[in-house]
């Protein structure tokens, strides 16, 4: 699967307490809490969300750091506003 996001993309993120499969979620990086990671939700449960990068061969995700607890979920990325030629809605992929 080709990556949805590229380095340098700027996103509008809406706060959310839950995420559905296919959403692009934002959570703190478990390895460095001051950074945020943006990954696709592949499974959501009461225990947390399992995240996977759109390019699994080049992605550090739940396969490395495990599911992200729901309380750490910062929100869902819904719109890319920069760069101008890539503006648009970030849709949910239905598995």
Image (cartoon, rainbow, N blue to C red):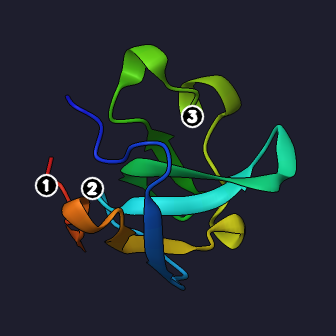
The residue drawn where x is 19% and y is 66% is: 91
Q: Is residue 62 above or below residue 81?
A: above
The residue drawn where x is 48% and y is 78% is: 13
> In terms of secondary structure, where does tag 1 sit?
loop
Tag of residue 65 = none
Residue, disc 2: 22
The quarter of the picture where the N terminus appears is: top left
Residue, disc 3: 62
The residue drawn where x is 70% and y is 71% is: 71
Q: Position of residue 14 (x, y in %)?
A: 47, 85
Q: Position of residue 20 (x, y in %)?
A: 33, 66
Q: Is residue 63 above or below residue 17?
A: above
User: Is any part of residue 55 visible from this angle?
Assistant: yes
Q: Are marks 3 and 1 in contact (CB under 8 Å)?
A: no
Q: Residue furthest top?
A: 57
Q: Are marks 1 and 2 in contact (CB under 8 Å)?
A: yes
Measured in 3D between alpha carbons, the distance from the residue under mark 3 to the one under mark 1, in whole angstroms, is: 19 Å
CA neighbours of label 1 inside 10 A, class few (<14), some (14 to 19), many (20+): few
Residue, disc 1: 94
Q: Position of residue 25 (x, y in %)?
A: 47, 61
């Amino acid at each position: 699967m080709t990556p949805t996001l590229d380095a340098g993309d700027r996103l509008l993120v809406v706060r959310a307490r839950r995420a559905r499969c296919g959403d692009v979620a934002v959570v703190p990086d478990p390895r460095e809490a001051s950074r945020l990671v943006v990954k696709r939700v592949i499974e959501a449960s009461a225990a947390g969300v399992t995240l996977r990068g759109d390019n699994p061969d080049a992605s550090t995700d739940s396969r490395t750091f495990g599911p992200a607890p729901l309380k750490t979920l910062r929100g869902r990325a819904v719109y890319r506003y920069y760069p101008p030629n890539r503006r648009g809605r970030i849709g949910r992929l239905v598995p």
